Image (cartoon, rainbow, N blue to C red):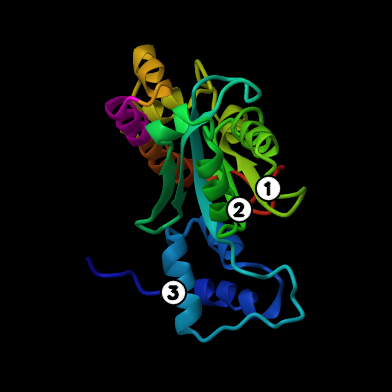
Amino acid sequence: MKRKPWSEPEVNMLQEYENTSISAYQLYHKLLLKGYTRTFKSVTRKIESLGLRKPSRYKTGHEKTIGYLDIETTGLKANVDIMLSWAIKTRDKDEVLSDVIKKSEVFNGKYDYRIVKSLIKALEKYDVIMTYYGTRFDVPFMRTRALDHNLQFPKFRNLSHKDIFYLVRSKLQLTRSSLKTATQFLGIDGKTNLDPRVWRDARYGNKKALKYVFDHNVADVEILEDLHKKIEQYTNANVVPA
């Protein structure tokens, strides 16, 4: 498909990248609000092709690497439950970083130590992490598991976090604010339900059950990216709540 030529007003907006502290993602967002239909990837490519460079004096102008995060666990309380898997989808890339617990770890007393450690390492790659209800669940659960294993979880403000749950709740009027309801309403396929017995079997290291949980995990981060792209034009790109 032939790409639409960049208009002069669009190019003029991109010039802000070199003259202000605004990031490529914020410029992409401004273009959306103006009614232009560019992708984040096309914006970054155009900035590169124009030879625009961010002056070092603009300390807040670094490019944002955005990841969509979800975890799967044996239950809701991290002092007694453990993580089964995690996945992070990198925005606009065919890339999902992930890990899943092994049966041997369930029974040798190490539990989720290895995958919590690998998750913390993966978080270093991202400037902004997007979750769905992560403020109340995913992030506190991850932090609790890290503390249980004496691992250093990212400190306050070391990593920006945006919870798309609150974006959906404030911008849409749905029967429920669940990920399933939001994606179904917007025609985004991929959200599945899991039989509680699958979680029971996964808790005890059943390989088939763990594979099923893991696939569900990856599907959730992929549809989370799609959901965010559908509704991000209705919010301020500069607002990234903790």
Residue at the image position 39 percent from the left and 27 percent from the top: 185
Cα gap from disc 1 to disc 3, whole angstroms: 24 Å
The residue identified by callout 3 is 45
Density class for disc 1 (Cα within 10 Å; few <14, some 14-19, many ≥20) is: few
Density class for disc 3 (Cα within 10 Å; few <14, some 14-19, many ≥20) is: few
Which stretch is magenta? 206-216
- Dot 1 amino acid type: Val
| Residue 242 appears in the figure | yes
- Dot 3 amino acid type: Arg
Task: Please indicate whether residue 16 sits to the left or right of residue 105 in the image.
Answer: right
Position of residue 224 measured from the top left corner of the image (x, y, whole percent): 45, 39
**Residue 131 occupies which quadrant of the picture?**
top right
Q: Is residue 26 above or below residue 100?
A: below
Name the foreground residue: 229 vs 220.
220
Q: Is residue 127 above or below residue 192?
A: below
Of badges 1 and 2, nearer the viewer stands 2
Task: First in sequence, mark 3 or 2: give its number.
Answer: 3
Q: Main secondary structure of the magenta part?
A: helix
The residue identified by callout 1 is 240
**Residue 207 occupies which quadrant of the picture?**
top left
